[in-house]
C-alpha cells in the first residue's frame, strides 16, 4: 500500500482505464483479503454524485476533465436500460453488470492522493484496513477475514513459508478518527465485533528451559564460592544459604556455609552446619577435619580429639597439635583448682589455652574456672574480677545458676552477705537440685547467725561469752577472708577489755593478714600495743595507718597521744618506782613512800652503791605524786611538753639538788645532826638506829612517823 508513502513525482495517466471498478477491486484485494461478510449497500445515486466531486477536487492540474457516467459508456449501452441485478451478485468492487461495460460511479483510485480527499466510504474502508493492519502486526493474525463484507470468489492462494516470513516494506499509515468513541478495530463498515471471528492466540518466542532446584542450588553455590574467594563472607553465607534452602540435605553446601561461618568468626553457627554435614556424610575426611577445628576454636578439645579419631587415614600431627596443647592446659588448670594450689597455677594454663581459640568467645566453662581462681586470691581486685566475669555470664543468661552462685560468693567474700543470700536463693529457684547453691546458702546463714550472737554478747559486756561465739563463727568457713577478718577484730576488742593484750594483738595481726586494707583492725592493734605499754610500736602503727588513710584527722591525735606516752615511758615512772597503781590515792602514795624509804635508805645499805640512786628516785616520785598539781601535769605529760621536768616547784625541794639537801642534814652526813637542812620542815622523825634523834626542820617530809 502506498497511501501513506511519500508523494510520487509521476503524473497520473491522462487516459483512464475502461474498468475503474475492476482496478479498484484489484487494489483493495492486494491490501486485504476478501471477507464473506456482506457489505452494506449504498444507493447508486449517492455513489454517482459523490465520486465525481471528490475526484474533481483531488484532480491534478493539467489532467483532462472527467467524463460523465453516460459519456464513459459505449453508445449501445447508453441506450439500453440497466437491468437490476440481485444484491448478492454484486462484487466487492461493484463491477459493471454487463461484460465490456465500465463503472460510471467510481474512478480509479490514485495511490498518490491524500486519504482525506477520498470519498467517505473509501475513508472508512481505509481506516478499517489500517487498524486491521496494525492489529495484525502485533498479533500476527494473518488468517483474519476481511471486514469490508466482500465475498471472495476463490480462497486466497497459499504463499510459501519464506514469503510469509518476509518482512513487509515499511509504510506510513493514517487512521481517521471514528466518532462517538467507536474503535476502528471493533467496527468496520458497521459490522460489530460479535460478527467478526476471534483472532488466533498470540505467538511468542520459545523461552529458555526452567532450571531445576538442583541446578539453581549449584549456581548459588558457585556465586558463594566467588564471594568466599573475595573474602566477602557475609555475601558468601547469603548464597550458600540459598543453596541450602533448595537442597537442605547436601553435605557439600552445608560444609561450604560452615567454612564461611568460620571465616566470619561465627563458630556456633559453623558448628551446627558442620555437625549436620557430618551426619549426612559420616566418612568425609574434609568435613570431619573442619568439625574438629571448630571444636578446638570453641574451646572443646575433648570433642576435637574424638572427632580426629574418626578420620581415616589419621590426620597429621600438625592438624591435631592445637587441640592436644589446649587439652593439656585445661587439665592442668582443673588439677590445680581441685588440689587447692595457688591461684596463679590456675590462671596461667587458662591464659595459655585461651591463646588457641582465636577469635571465638571464651568458653563459659573456662570463665567459671577463672572466677574460682580469683575467689581463692580473695583480695579486692580479684573479687572485682569475679564480679565482672559473673556479670558477663548473667548478661548472656540471667537464669544461669552457676553464674548466680559465682557472683553470690563474690558478694559473700566482700562481706555483703544479704545480697549473697539473695543470689543463692535465686540460683536454687532456677535449679532446685543445684548442690553448690544449697551449700553456700547454708554456710552464709549459719555464719550470720553466729556473728549476730557474738555481737549481742559484746553489747551485754559479757566479754568471754562473746569471745566464744566469735571463735565458733571462725570455724564455719576458714576460707572466707572478709568475714573472718571482721570476726577476729571483734574478738580482739573483747580481749582488750579483759586486758589480754597479747591475744588481742595476735587477733588483729591475723585479721590484717586476711585483709591488708582492713584499717579498723590496724587501729585496734595500735590501741592494744598502747595498752600493753609498747608505745614505740604503737606510734609506728599509727603512722602507718595515717599513710593509708590521710583523710582521717583523728589519726593525728592518736599519733600525738602515742608519742607523749612514748616519752612518758622513757622517763622515770614514779608509779612504778613506788610500786603503786596509777589510780592510787594520796594515802597509798604516802604509805608506799615510807616503806620504800626505810628499805632503800643509804644508811641501811652501806655496801650498796645503787642504794643512794634508788633513794633519790623514791624521793622524786613522792614529791611529784603527793602534789595534786604536779601529779596531774605528770599524768598528762605537760611537763614533757614544756621541757622542764623539775621546774615550776617540781622535784626535790622546789628544784634543789638532792645532794645539797643531804648535806644540809648535818656534818655527819645525811639525816645526821640538827639544822635546817634535809627535806621540807615538819615534825622530827625517830629512827631506831642507835643514833641521836634530831628534831626541828630536818628529816623526811611531815606526816611520816616511824617508831
Image (cartoon, rainbow, N blue to C red):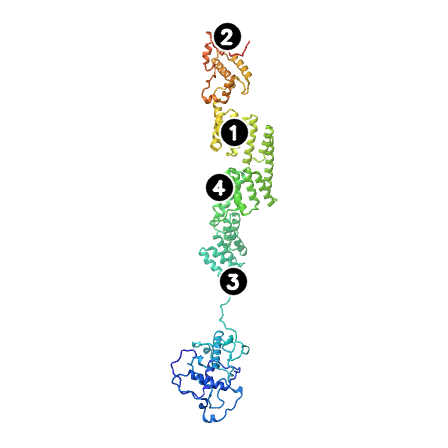
> Does residue 667 sit above or below 282 in this rendering?
above
Q: Quadrant of the C terminus?
A: top right
Q: Earlier in the sequence, mark 4 or mark 1?
A: 4
Element type at marker 3?
Answer: helix
Residue name at image x 46 percent, y 94 percent? 76
- Mark linked to residue 696: 2
Tell whether label 3 touches label 4 (CB within 8 Å).
no
- Viewer-proximal residue, 562 or 246? 562
Residue name at image x 49 percent, y 89 percent? 97
Q: Nearer the viewer, mark 4 or mark 1?
A: 1
The percent coordinates of residue 353 (x first, y second) are: 49, 45
Q: Nearer the viewer, mark 2 or mark 3?
A: 2
Q: Earlier in the sequence, mark 2 or mark 3?
A: 3
Residue name at image x 57 percent, y 38 percent? 417
The percent coordinates of residue 286 (x first, y second) are: 49, 54
Q: Earlier in the sequence, mark 4 or mark 3?
A: 3
Residue for badge 3: 214
Quarter-wise, where is residue 588 in the image? top right
Within 10 Å of the Cα at label 4, are there few (<14), some (14-19), or many (20+) other Cα atoms? some
The percent coordinates of residue 551 (x first, y second) are: 48, 33
Q: Quadrant of the N terminus?
A: bottom left
Q: Earlier in the sequence, mark 1 or mark 3?
A: 3
- Mark linked to residue 525: 1
Kindly report the distance in space between the C-alpha atoms of the residues bearing marks 4 and 1.
Answer: 37 Å
> Does residue 639 sit above or below 40 in this rendering?
above
Tell whether label 3 touches label 1 (CB within 8 Å).
no
- Mark linked to residue 348: 4
Kindly report the distance in space between the C-alpha atoms of the residues bearing marks 4 and 3.
Answer: 52 Å
Amino acid at each position: 500500500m502506498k497511501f501513506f508513502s511519500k508523494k510520487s513525482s509521476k503524473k497520473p495517466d491522462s487516459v483512464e482505464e475502461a474498468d475503474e471498478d475492476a482496478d479498484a477491486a484489484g487494489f483493495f484485494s492486494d491490501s486485504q483479503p476478501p471477507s464473506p461478510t456482506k457489505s452494506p449497500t449504498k444507493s447508486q445515486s449517492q455513489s454517482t454524485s459523490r465520486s465525481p466531486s471528490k475526484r474533481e477536487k483531488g484532480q491534478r492540474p493539467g489532467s483532462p476533465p472527467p467524463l460523465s457516467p453516460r459519456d464513459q459508456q459505449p453508445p449501445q449501452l447508453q441506450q439500453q436500460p440497466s437491468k437490476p441485478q440481485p444484491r448478492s451478485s454484486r462484487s466487492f468492487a461493484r463491477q459493471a453488470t454487463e461484460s465490456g461495460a465500465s463503472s460510471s460511479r467510481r474512478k480509479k483510485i490514485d495511490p498518490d492522493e491524500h486519504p482525506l480527499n477520498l470519498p467517505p466510504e473509501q475513508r472508512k474502508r481505509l481506516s478499517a484496513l489500517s487498524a486491521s493492519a496494525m492489529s495484525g502486526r502485533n498479533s500476527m493474525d494473518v488468517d483474519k477475514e476481511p471486514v469490508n463484507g466482500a465475498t471472495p470468489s476463490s480462497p486466497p492462494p497459499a504463499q510459501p513459508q519464506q514469503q510469509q516470513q518476509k518482512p513487509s516494506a515499511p509504510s506510513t499509515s493514517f487512521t481517521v478518527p471514528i466518532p462517538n468513541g467507536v474503535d476502528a478495530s471493533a467496527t468496520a463498515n458497521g459490522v460489530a465485533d460479535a460478527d467478526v471471528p476471534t483472532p488466533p492466540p498470540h505467538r511468542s518466542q520459545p523461552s529458555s528451559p526452567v532450571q531445576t532446584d538442583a541446578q539453581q542450588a549449584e549456581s548459588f553455590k558457585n556465586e558463594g564460592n566467588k564471594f568466599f574467594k573475595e573474602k566477602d563472607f557475609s555475601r558468601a553465607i547469603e548464597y550458600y544459604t540459598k543453596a541450602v534452602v533448595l537442597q537442605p540435605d547436601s553435605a557439600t553446601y552445608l560444609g561450604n556455609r560452615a567454612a564461611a561461618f568460620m571465616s566470619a568468626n561465627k563458630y556456633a553457627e559453623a558448628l551446627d552446619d558442620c555437625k549436620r554435614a557430618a551426619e549426612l556424610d559420616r566418612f568425609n575426611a574434609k568435613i570431619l577435619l573442619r568439625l574438629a577445628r571448630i571444636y578446638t576454636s570453641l574451646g572443646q578439645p575433648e570433642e576435637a580429639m574424638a572427632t580426629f579419631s574418626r578420620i581415616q587415614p589419621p590426620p597429621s600431627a600438625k592438624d591435631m597439635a592445637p587441640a592436644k596443647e589446649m587439652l593439656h592446659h585445661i587439665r592442668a588448670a582443673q588439677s590445680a583448682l581441685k588440689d587447692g594450689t595457688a591461684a596463679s597455677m590456675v590462671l596461667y594454663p587458662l591464659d595459655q589455652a585461651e591463646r588457641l581459640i582465636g577469635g571465638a568467645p571464651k568458653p563459659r566453662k573456662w570463665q567459671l574456672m577463672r572466677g574460682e581462681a580469683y575467689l581463692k586470691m580473695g583480695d579486692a581486685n580479684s573479687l572485682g574480677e569475679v564480679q565482672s566475669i559473673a556479670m558477663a555470664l548473667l548478661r548472656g543468661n540471667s537464669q544461669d545458676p552457676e553464674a548466680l552462685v559465682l557472683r553470690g560468693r563474690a558478694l559473700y567474700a566482700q562481706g555483703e552477705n544479704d545480697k549473697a543470700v539473695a543470689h543463692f536463693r535465686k540460683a536454687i529457684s532456677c535449679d532446685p537440685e543445684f548442690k553448690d547453691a544449697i551449700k553456700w546458702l547454708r554456710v552464709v546463714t549459719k555464719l550470720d547467725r553466729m556473728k549476730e550472737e557474738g555481737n549481742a554478747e559484746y553489747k551485754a559486756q559479757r566479754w568471754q561469752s562473746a569471745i566464744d561465739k566469735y571463735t565458733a563463727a571462725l570455724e564455719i568457713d576458714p576460707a572466707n577472708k572478709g568475714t573472718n577478718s571482721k570476726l577476729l577484730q571483734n574478738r580482739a576488742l573483747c580481749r582488750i577489755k579483759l586486758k589480754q593484750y597479747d591475744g588481742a594483738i595476735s587477733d588483729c595481726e591475723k585479721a590484717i593478714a586476711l585483709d591488708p586494707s582492713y584499717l579498723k583492725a590496724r587501729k585496734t592493734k595500735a590501741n592494744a600495743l598502747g595498752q600493753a605499754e609498747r608505745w614505740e610500736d604503737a606510734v609506728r602503727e599509727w603512722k602507718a595507718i595515717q599513710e593509708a588513710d590521710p583523710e582521717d584527722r583523728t589519726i593525728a591525735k592518736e599519733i600525738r597521744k602515742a608519742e607523749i606516752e612514748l616519752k612518758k615511758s622513757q622517763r622515770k615512772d614514779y608509779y612504778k618506782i613506788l610500786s603503786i597503781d596509777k589510780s592510787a590515792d594520796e594515802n597509798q602514795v604516802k604509805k608506799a613512800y615510807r616503806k620504800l624509804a626505810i628499805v632503800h635508805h643509804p644508811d641501811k645499805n652501806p655496801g650498796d652503791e645503787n642504794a643512794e640512786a634508788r633513794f633519790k628516785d623514791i624521793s622524786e616520785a613522792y614529791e611529784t605524786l603527793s602534789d595534786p598539781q604536779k601529779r596531774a601535769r605528770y599524768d598528762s605529760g605537760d611537763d614533757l611538753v614544756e621541757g622542764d621536768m623539775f621546774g615550776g616547784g617540781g622535784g626535790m625541794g622546789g628544784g634543789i639538788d638532792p645532794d645539797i639537801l643531804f648535806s644540809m642534814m648535818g656534818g655527819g652526813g645525811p639525816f645526821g645532826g640538827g639544822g635546817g637542812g634535809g627535806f621540807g620542815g615538819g615534825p622530827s622523825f625517830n629512827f631506831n638506829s642507835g643514833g641521836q634523834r634530831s628534831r626541828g626542820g630536818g628529816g623526811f617530809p611531815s606526816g611520816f612517823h616511824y617508831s
